[in-house]
Amino acid sequence: MSADTAEFLPEAGEVTMFTTSWCGYCKRLRPQLDQAGVAYGEVNIEDIPNGAQVVEAANGGNQTVPTLLFSDGSTLTNPSLAQVKDQLAAIG
């Protein structure tokens, strides 16, 4: 986890989802998380200073959204709902 992502670290059992207003994959994942009861906070990287750099730090230089940040500092990029659930279960 980088210093860029540290301030967005979620509580245990929750995720932070980095998005943009125009991201179709973000729009698809949101209702899936809602239906599954996965608690998440959303951060539109267009609305924060250095938003692109935050996502780049989590993705090895790539500006890909949705990027999900977990309480242990791990991330998933454009994950399926199953991948999100598996990661949450793995970190407890």
Image (tube, helix red, strand yellow):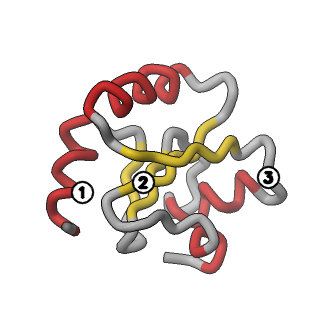
Q: Which residue is mark 1?
A: 88
The span from disc 3 to disc 2 (Cα, nearest Å) is 18 Å
- Residue at x 58%, y 43% (from the top left corner): 42
| Residues at marks 1 and 2 touching, judged by CB atoms closer than 8 Å | yes
- Residue 57 at x, y percent in the picture: 59, 66
Left or right of 55, for residue 1: left
- Residue 48 at x, y percent in the picture: 79, 52
Type of amino acid at the residue the image marks with label 3: Ile
The span from disc 1 to disc 3 (Cα, nearest Å) is 26 Å
Q: Which residue is mark 3?
A: 48
The span from disc 1 to disc 2 (Cα, nearest Å) is 8 Å
Left or right of 57, for residue 1: left
Helix, strand or loop at label 2? It is: strand
Left or right of 66, for residue 76: left
Q: Which residue is mark 2?
A: 15
Type of amino acid at the residue the image marks with label 1: Leu
- Residue at x 19%, y 38% (from the top left corner): 82
**How dense is the environment of label 3, judged by Cα within 10 Å: few (below 14), some, or many (20 and up)?**
few
Q: Nearer the viewer, mark 3 or mark 2?
A: 2
Asked where in the image residue 92 lies, by quadrant, the reply is bottom left
- Residue at x 30%, y 36% (from the top left corner): 37
User: Considering only order in the chain, which callout, 3 or 1, is on the residue closer to the N terminus?
Assistant: 3
